[in-house]
Image (cartoon, rainbow, N blue to C red):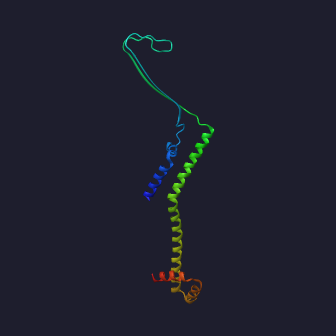
Amino acid sequence: MKKLIILTIFSIFFTTGCSMIPRLTLDTPNSTPQQTDRSKAKEVCKGKVEMNEQGEIISCSKGYYRYDENYAKKERKYTFTEKIKNFINKLSASIFWIAILLLIFLPGVFGVIVGRIFNGATKALYQTIEAIKKFRKSSSAKEELDNFLRETQDKETKKIIATKRVE
């Protein structure tokens, strides 16, 4: 069973290609940024520097050093159509996983239910046979019961009762 599950998972990943990537991000909103800004600034001053009105270095006394790294990400907004498509994609992925779970668990559950039904029917049959045995031992209408059973039972039922009677 483990090999079947592993084989199913690998076949899903290999046959879906890049369409599985959105499923693996798991509802990360706006995972594709519209704009990213990366900047690095390095200022070194070895001597006299003056500053202007915008705050940039115009002058410096001998040992000034500055290094900045900045990262800014601007998320894009989804359009209404994209929101609907994403909803359908998430829904189809959910239905897919529910179907996989049903394929794995439904045969077992079905087997348990059918087993319980047959177990109950077998138990009822054995209890009926035991009741008939007790009735035969304690009653005087034994011949009437035997005649009635011979008339109403078919060959298969008679075989089952005969094997149980031997036990």
Q: In x, y percent, where is residue 6? A: 44, 54
Q: On the rendered image, what quadrant is the C terminus found in?
A: bottom left
Q: Is residue 129 above or below residue 28?
A: below
Q: Residue at x 47, y 55 (%)?
A: 8
Q: From the viewer's perspective, tell me whether residue 47 is left or right of residue 53.
A: left
Q: Position of residue 115 (x, y in %)?
A: 51, 68
Which one is nearer the viewer's eye here, 9 or 124? Answer: 9
The residue closer to the viewer here, 11 or 167, is 11
Of all residues, the one furthest to the right in this rendering is 80
Is 39 on the left-hand or right-hand side of 95?
left
Please give left or right for residue 53 compared with residue 88 in the image: left
Above or below for 113 versus 56 = below
Residue at left offset 63%, top offset 38%: 80
User: Residue 158: image x %, image y %?
Assistant: 53, 83
> Residue, x 51% and y 65% (percent of image)?
111
State the residue at coordinates (50%, 46%). 17
In the figure, 30 relative to 45: above or below?
Answer: below
The N terminus, quarter of image: bottom left
Q: Nearer the viewer, residue 162 or 68?
A: 68
- Counting labels gives 0
In percent of width and height, residue 128 lies at 53, 78
